[in-house]
């Protein structure tokens, strides 16, 4: 259990629990990690089709252990607001999620009211994190595959986008994050791998949708 907790603390590094609204990311030279996705798989669909449904609560588990919950709180034409609950501690995330882009634009841990919608009245943070941008063809994450089919505890999904980011946040090793997004559901799985002598892998899969 300790191993799961430690790995998932790294796995959801995006949630780094501080009380600051602007959270610096420790990536391989931010500029260098802006990947030119020229040879990426071709996306023919609309990224809006991959948004999760507002009003749902999604539980991610590793085997039988609950890792975190993701509550889809609100959306408008441009943004979607999520509340992440890790061991009961909330973090608000807002993504610019359009037909051509998915970018984390706002993140705040321990908000005063995690159930309050701020999707129409927030100030974007300075250090954005782009998962996909079909117009600029650059991102912090790289689209590495489009899977014909992926099965997780809540069901079987087709045309799944697979995104990956590699960082050097652990000295002497690579930290590899991989996320899987499905139509109408959003994130359905994420994996974590730490290379090196003490390396290991872990994952969280979408196990319950309420």
Image (tube, rainbow, N blue to C red):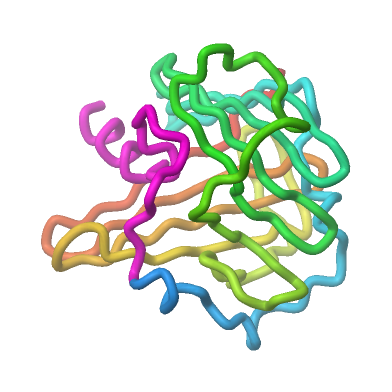
Q: Is residue 195 left or right of residue 141?
A: left
Can residue 165 be seen here? The reply is yes
Residue closer to the observer: 19 or 69:
19
Please state the horizontal and vertical placement of residue 153, each as a whole percent of the image. 62, 34
Q: Quadrant of the N terminus?
A: top left
Q: Is residue 192 left or right of residue 69?
A: left
Please state the horizontal and vertical placement of residue 199, each as a whole percent of the image. 20, 57
Please state the horizontal and vertical placement of residue 196, each as a whole percent of the image. 17, 65
- Residue at (79%, 71%) from the top-left corner? 43
54 falls in the magenta region = no
- Residue at (38%, 27%) from the top-left corner? 19
Residue closer to the observer: 67 or 65:
67
Can residue 64 be seen here? The reply is no
- Residue at (41%, 44%) from the top-left corner? 23
Q: Which residues are magenta?
A: 1-28
Q: Quadrant of the C terminus?
A: top right
Residue closer to the observer: 180 or 207:
180
Up-down relation of residue 196 to residue 50 (above or below): below
Up-down relation of residue 192 to residue 51 (above or below): below
């Amino acid at each position: 259990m300790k191993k799961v907790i430690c790995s998932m603390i790294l796995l959801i590094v995006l949630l780094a629990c501080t009380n600051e609204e602007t959270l610096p990311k420790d990536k391989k030279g931010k500029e260098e990690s802006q990947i030119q996705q020229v040879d990426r798989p071709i996306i023919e669909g609309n990224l809006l089709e991959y948004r999760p449904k507002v009003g749902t609560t999604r539980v991610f588990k590793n085997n039988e252990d609950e890792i975190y919950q993701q509550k889809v709180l609100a959306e408008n034409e441009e943004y979607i607001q999520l509340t992440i609950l890790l061991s009961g501690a909330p973090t608000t995330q807002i993504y610019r999620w359009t037909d051509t882009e998915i970018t984390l634009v706002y993140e705040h841990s321990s908000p005063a009211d995690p159930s309050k919608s701020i999707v129409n009245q927030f100030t974007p943070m300075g250090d954005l994190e782009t998962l996909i941008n079909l117009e600029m063809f650059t991102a912090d994450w790289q689209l590495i595959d489009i899977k014909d089919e992926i099965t997780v505890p809540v069901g079987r999904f087709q045309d799944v986008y697979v995104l990956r980011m590699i960082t050097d946040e652990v000295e002497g090793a690579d930290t590899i994050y991989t996320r899987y997004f499905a139509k109408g559901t959003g994130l359905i799985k994420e994996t974590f791998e730490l290379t090196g002598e003490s390396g290991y892998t872990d994952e969280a899969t979408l196990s319950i949708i309420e």
